[in-house]
Image (cartoon, rainbow, N blue to C red):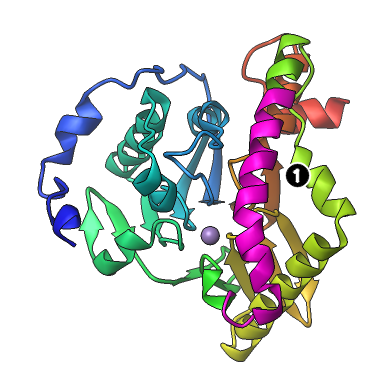
Amino acid sequence: MATISRLPFDADLSDFTDAQPSIPEKTVTKRRKYRTVWISDVHLGTRGCNAEMLIDFLDHVDSDTMYLVGDIIDGWRLKKKFYWPPAHNDIVWRIMKRAKRNTRIVYIPGNHDEMFRQFTGMNFGGVEIRRQAIHETADGRRLLVLHGDEFDAVMLSHRWLAHLGDAAYTMMMALNRWVNAYRRMMKLPYWSLSKHAKKKVKNAVEFISDFEEIVAREAKSRGVDGVVAGHIHTADMREIQGVEYFNDGDWVEGCTALVEHFDGRMEILHWGDEIAAREAVPQADVPADNARAAA
Ligand SMILES: [Mn+2]
């Protein structure tokens, strides 16, 4: 508590947004604009965070509303070992700048950034802190937005996986970094290790589908049309028991965002693929949708 109260929340945040980030904002002729963007599980403060990919995303995509669906900052890991490179500050800078440019930003802290939950209902430099939210899409569907760790206790049978998971996951992410550093050197596109591993490991698959079903059941009991969650680092969108289930994935290795188009249509953006598509087209800043359609 004592450490929290010393955080400079009363400081004039324009001091921060007026300063320049270490990685300058890209001058993109026309940013892709969506009605809504959801991102989560960024894990700032850890080596696993794919900050450069997220910076690239933020420099190419804009929205009327942006939801930060938890585990944006990894307070657990930061407590053990302080790690805060300039690129991580640049992400905070870009989010605050967006708020200043009138993007509505709703921050729903997760379990790794639960220290912000005590500020629920408050607003910091245009960033609203909420425990959960109801989002209404352009075509009038109501979506419950939450991080998803609130269901961990229900998933008792998988508790061992949560404990084993953290160590194993940290190791896998280290491996993922090496694999992708090598691939970058060889000019190969970004490749997600755990995306492939998750498909093959039976327990992980069961864990994910149990989570998805529990979350969908909760949404159904709350009488909403759908639910947007994060937490399990697995992007997905599908119907479960008559409820729309969305997961925006993560920026540790999946590097995905969930977006709502202006007509209410939802889509998962795989930013590694978007960068690859952009780089395959000779002219700069051609929207990846066009690049895909042309391919
Ligand atoms: Mn989480």
How many other residues sit within 10 Å of disc 1, few (<14), some (14-19) or many (≥20)?
many
User: 25 or 208: nearer the eye?
Assistant: 208
Q: Position of residue 108 (x, y in %)?
A: 42, 62
Judging depth in this view, the residue of 175 and 260 nearest the camera is 175
Q: Secondary structure at mark 1?
A: helix
Left or right of 120: which side holds 114? right
The region drawn magenta spans: 152-179
Q: Quadrant of residue 209?
A: bottom right
**Residue 225 highlighted magenta (yes or no):** no
> In percent of the image, x 49 and y 58: which residue is there?
69
At x 56%, y 37%, the residue is 48
Q: Is residue 129 above or below residue 151?
A: above
- Identity of the amino acid at label 1? Ser
Q: Position of residue 93 (x, y in %)?
A: 32, 33
Q: Is residue 170 visible?
A: yes
Image-based side of 186 in relation to 44, left or right = right
Q: Is residue 171 magenta?
A: yes
Looking at the rendered image, the quarter that the C terminus falls into is top right
The one nearer the camera, 250 or 278, is 250
260 vs 109, nearest the viewer: 109
Q: Main secondary structure of the magenta part?
A: helix
Residue 279 found in image quarter = top right
On-image quarter of the N terminus: bottom left
Residue in the picture at 61% in, 43% down: 170
Percent of width and height locating residue 250: 60, 47
Instruction: Find residue 41 and report its horizontal and vertical position in percent.
Output: 54, 50
Q: Describe residue 283's horizontal placement relative to residue 41 as left or right.
A: right
**Residue at 69% over, 49% down:** 268
Q: Which residue is mark 1?
A: 194
